Image (spheres, coloured by chain):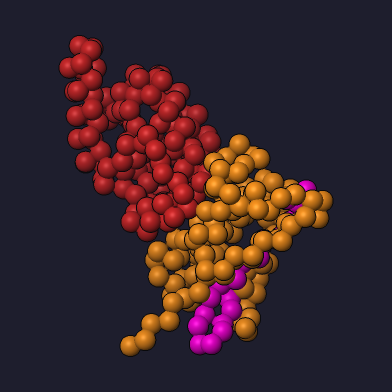
Amino acid sequence: MDVLRAREVPLTSEYDIARARQMVRAWALEISLGLVDQTKIVTAASELARNTVVHGGGGAMFLELISSEQRKGLRLTFKDNGPGIPDIQVAMEDGYTTGGGLGLGLSGAKRLVNEFVIKSAEGEGTEVILIKWKLVTHD
Amino acid sequence: MEKIPIIKIDRFLLVSIQVDMHDNLALSLQDELLTKITATGAKGVLIDISMLDIVDSFIGRILGSIAEMAKILDAEVVVVGMRPAVAITMVELGLSLEGIRTALDVDKGIKLLNTVLDERENIDGRVTR
C-alpha cells in the first residue's frame, strides 16, 4: 500500500470536529468518491473525531490518501492519549456509551467504512483506523 | 457569534440550517428554538436540513431531543429536506430518528403539520389557529 499524501489535523476542541469533517470531505472529493460513500466516511470521521475530543481528551486525526492495486482510498487514523477503553468488545456494541450519547459512535462508524481497526488499553489511549476504498468500476 | 435564524410564519416556526453545525451551535439552536416556541406560542416547527451534508449521532440526538421537548411545550416538529445520501448513512450508522416526523420539503412539511394540528383540534376541541 502506498501513501500518496498525508496530513495531520489536530483535534482539541469541538471546532476541530467540524474542521476534520471538511478536510475529509475535500479529500474524498479529490478521489471522486461517490456521494453516498463521501457521506459515510465524513459521518464516520465526525463520530471518531468527537470521541477523540470528548472521551480521549483531545488528540489528532491523520488523514492519508492511499493506493493499492489500482484503487485509491482514504485512511483516517484517530489517536488520543486519553483513559483508553478497558473492554473493546463491549465498547463496540450498539448502545455502549460513557458520554451520555446514543452509543452509536464506534459500532456505527465501523458499518460505514471498509476497514476498521481499534487499538486501546486502559490508561494507554486509543487509536482507531478507518479505510474507505473507492470502488473500482470496470467499463 | 454564528446564529441560525428562526422565522415565524403563521402559527409555525421555520429553521433552515445553512451552515456546517458544530456541536455548540446545535446546542444553542436547541435552547433558542424552545425559548421561541414558548414566546410565540407556535404550534409547529419545521427544521429544514436540506443543506446539511451529514447527520451524525450528535445531531441526530439534538433533533430527537428538540422534538421531544417541543412536544412538552405543545408544538409538533417536522424535519424536512433530508438528502438521500444522508438518510442512507443514518440508517447504517444506526440512527432511526424514532418519534420524529419527516417530510420531503418545506411545502410538504407545512401540509403535514396542518393535518396533524387539525386532527388534534378535532380530537380535543382545542383552538390552535
Identity of the residue drawn at 27% across and 42% down: B103
Residue B122 percent coordinates (x, y): 17, 17
Residue A124 percent coordinates (x, y): 81, 55
Identity of the residue drawn at 40% across and 70% down: A34
Apparent side of residue B109 relative to residue A14 in the rendered image (left or right): left
In the rendered image of this protein, which colour is used for chain B? red
Is A20 situated above or below A133? above
Identity of the residue drawn at 24% across and 17% down: B128
Residue B40 percent coordinates (x, y): 36, 20
Judged from this view, the residue extending furthest toward the front is A89
Residue B56 percent coordinates (x, y): 49, 49
Q: Which residue range is magenta in the image?
A: A65-85
Apparent side of residue B76 relative to residue B27 in the rendered image (left or right): left
For the stretch drawn in magenta, the main secondary structure is: strand
Q: Between residues A51 and B11, which one lies in front from this camera angle? A: A51
Q: Between residues B95 and B114, which one lies in front from this camera angle? A: B95
Q: Between residues B85 and B38, which one lies in front from this camera angle? A: B85
User: Is residue A82 one of those drawn in magenta?
Assistant: yes
In the rendered image of this protein, which colour is used for chain A? orange
Can residue A13 be seen by looking at this rendering? no
Can residue A113 be seen by looking at this rendering? yes
Apparent side of residue A127 relative to residue B128 in the rendered image (left or right): right
Identity of the residue drawn at 33% across and 88% down: A139
Q: Between residues A121 and B121, which one lies in front from this camera angle? A: A121
Q: In which quarter of the image is residue A35?
A: bottom left
User: Is residue B55 one of those drawn in magenta?
Assistant: no
Is B9 situated above or below B89? above
Apparent side of residue A76 relative to residue B106 in the rendered image (left or right): right
Judged from this view, the residue extending furthest toward the right is A123
Is A115 situated above or below B74? below
Q: In which quarter of the image is the N terminus of chain A?
A: bottom right
